[in-house]
Image (cartoon, coloured by chain):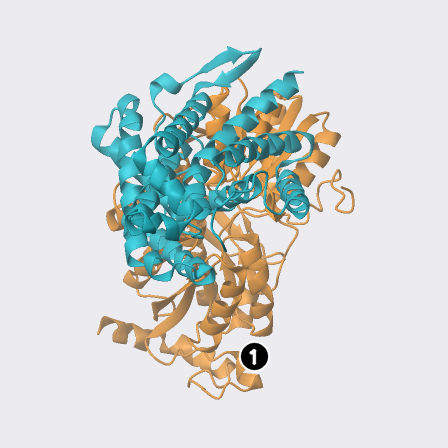
Amino acid sequence: MDVVISQAFTGASYGAALLLIALGLSLTFGQMGVINMAHGEFLMAGAYSAYLTQKLVTNADFSLVLAIPIAFCVAGLLGLLLEVLVISRMYHRALDTLLVTFGVSLVLQQAAKDLFGAQAKAVEAPGWLDGQIPVLGYRYPLSQMFILVLAIACLAGMAALLKYTGFGRQIRATVQNRDLAETVGVSTRRIDRLTFFIGSGLAGVAGVAVTLITATESTMGSEYIIWAFLVVVAGGIGQIKGAVIAAFGLGIMRAFLTYWTDGSMAVVLTFLIVVAFLQLRPQGLFAVRTRSLA
Amino acid sequence: MKSRARLVAGTAAALSAALVLTGCGSKSDDGGESSAAKGCVDTSGDSVKLGFLNSMSGPMSISESTVSDALNLAAEQINAEGGILGKKIEPVQEDGASEPTVFAEKATKLIQSDCVAAVFGGWTSSSRVAMRPVFKSLNNILFYPVQYEGLEADHNIFYTGATTNQQIIPALDFLKKEKKIESIFLAGSDYVFPRTANKIIKQYAAANDIKVVGEEYQPLDQGAWGTAVDKIVSTKPDVVFNTINGDSNVAFLKAYDEKGLDASSIPIVSVSIAEEEAAAIPVDLTGQMTSWNYYQTVEGETNSAFVKAFKDKFGQDRPTSDPMEAAYTSLWLYKAMVEKAETFDVDDVIDAAGGISFDAPEGKVTINGENHHIAKTALIGEVQKDKLIKTIWSSGEPIEPDPFLKTYDWWDPSKE
């Protein structure tokens, strides 16, 4: 029983980190159909933002919270720049976008290495995240709970945005039928840019969260990007509730598999299970219902 | 013009070298079979080219660029003393790009196009294994500066980092005799070094009444250590033996810290965390142990001179670490080998190697002519508050390298 609880929590924490990264991706990849390989580098930009914020503020208790909006803006602006300069020129050319954004990810990695040096940077966790709180007999680390809370907050924010705001309605209209949305006066170009800004910004927030888990260095994005794509694909493209279930499902599955086998085998088994699942349900957990005629 | 004068002084030695080495005095460009085997090393001028092959890009550049710095420092110091056999070292830096195949390509390029007399570098075992056939077929010398899993001895390679009986086994002896441990947990990255090291540890443990309560691996680029740390919490070992490599260590130690573990509850002995890595881990590591053959804090004039020279050249905030020291030492050992052989000829230099000693920053080291490793002193260190590492136990004298563990009766390579 102890094992079940501890692994459920460890897995859920990992799932929360995956969800944060996948949320942004489900917007840009899911809603806009852009395969953005540089999404992981926006996460890296967010992590370096946290590092720089800490350098400037020095008070670790405060800097992590301050870093969240900063990282959102930094990564969001990078994303906006990428959208305007590169991606907007190749919508509906999925393979080209994939290759170009992969190139951009390499450029960003090298730029980070030149700016910050090859050595990994240390981002200190705030003092108020030290320690654990007992939940159902499991000593749940506060820093992991923080990631979970942050993921849920971002999720709620995004769901509310999509559901209740005019901007959210315009996004949904654009996804469901771009031509019709344009006919009724929605500026789809503007919507594309804003969506990309928010999606990339969320990757930046994920980057701040990830500094609590791992090292801040130029290639950190590549560990997460594959998992994030896995979450989006398994959850059903364009489906936020699918992404939520897939992120926590994958995280918890990986934790239990790691417990029963070992870390390497768990990665292999998780991928095998996802591949088998996609054979049975190629559309993922939930399929998007579009109203386009195509 | 000083070098010109030195050249004259060294002519007698160089002359005999030229006599031994047919075709060495002049550079041959035809690249035919015989010249490839003989090499095209040009020592007719007042300099000698040496290849430095380190990853300056890719994930390994974090570690390997520091090795390149140490090599450049050694070259500068040797040149200031007049070079090797009166010839200035002319370093040719190549980037291995963290890819074993690139290492093999660049090694070939260094030997065949740049005509270097020897190559210094490599870090991962896969980079070394990829370069091995190149040095054999082109008959050149590789100096490899990193501790590794042992079980290898190549005619064309000199290993100046520790083999397992100079790092892993002394750490186990220390844990058994000084810390009186009864149980151990193994955590490592999933590749050849941790797998081999853990095989050795398990056989040692079986022969010494130590219980292995867990063995965990994560792929090198993955950092999901939470579950493994949960297992450490539930199995309560006396010590964790950490063979994790690279940034994955940060994720491991953060998870360790998050779950409330530290050196006073369950100490860790790490064999891949040196000063540079410790500084990048934002967790209190005070009291955690490491096993190496060199720390920046090693006492003695040679080391203080080395540390000072390094910091003066590369910055006061830069620490010096074991692989850097081993690389620095390797260039000085090469100088001694060439001067003993009185030629740059590869075969003569290799033949001259046995018994050569050097007063290195880590202490006295001696090349073993049989297996091409060097005798080194093992040092168990404890991480201090400032992330520097202090020696808490020493093997006292250099340990003879035994890469195949022939002198350990509990070792059976065929057994799992």
Residue positioned 31% across, 63% down in the render: B79
Is residue A111 found left or right of B152 in the rendered image?
left
Q: How crowded is mark 1: few (under 14 residues within 10 Å), some or many (20 or more)?
A: some
Name the colour assigned to chain A in the rendering: cyan
Residue matched to label 1: B37
The number of numbered discs placed on residues in the rendered structure image is 1
Q: Mark 1 lies on which chain?
A: B
Residue that appears at 48% across and 83% down: B19
In the depicted view, which residue is nearer to us: A136 or B43? Answer: A136
**Residue B238 position (above or below residue B409):** above
The location of residue B236, given as percent across then percent down, is 62, 19
Q: Which chain is orange?
A: B
Q: Is mark 1 on a helix, strand or loop?
A: helix
Residue type at mark 1 is Ala
Q: Position of residue A114 (x, y in %)?
A: 30, 52
Q: Residue lying farthest front?
A: A184
Q: Closest to the observer: A188 or B193?
A: A188
At 39% from the left edge and 71% from the top edge, which residue is drawn? Answer: B49
Q: Is residue B321 visible?
A: no
Please provide percent x and percent y for residue B82.
30, 65
Q: Quadrant of the N terminus of chain B?
A: bottom left
In this view, A69 is above or below B358: above
In-image side of A206 versus A191 (left or right): right
Residue A227 x/y as whole percent: 52, 42
Looking at the figure, which quarter contains the C terminus of chain B?
A: top right
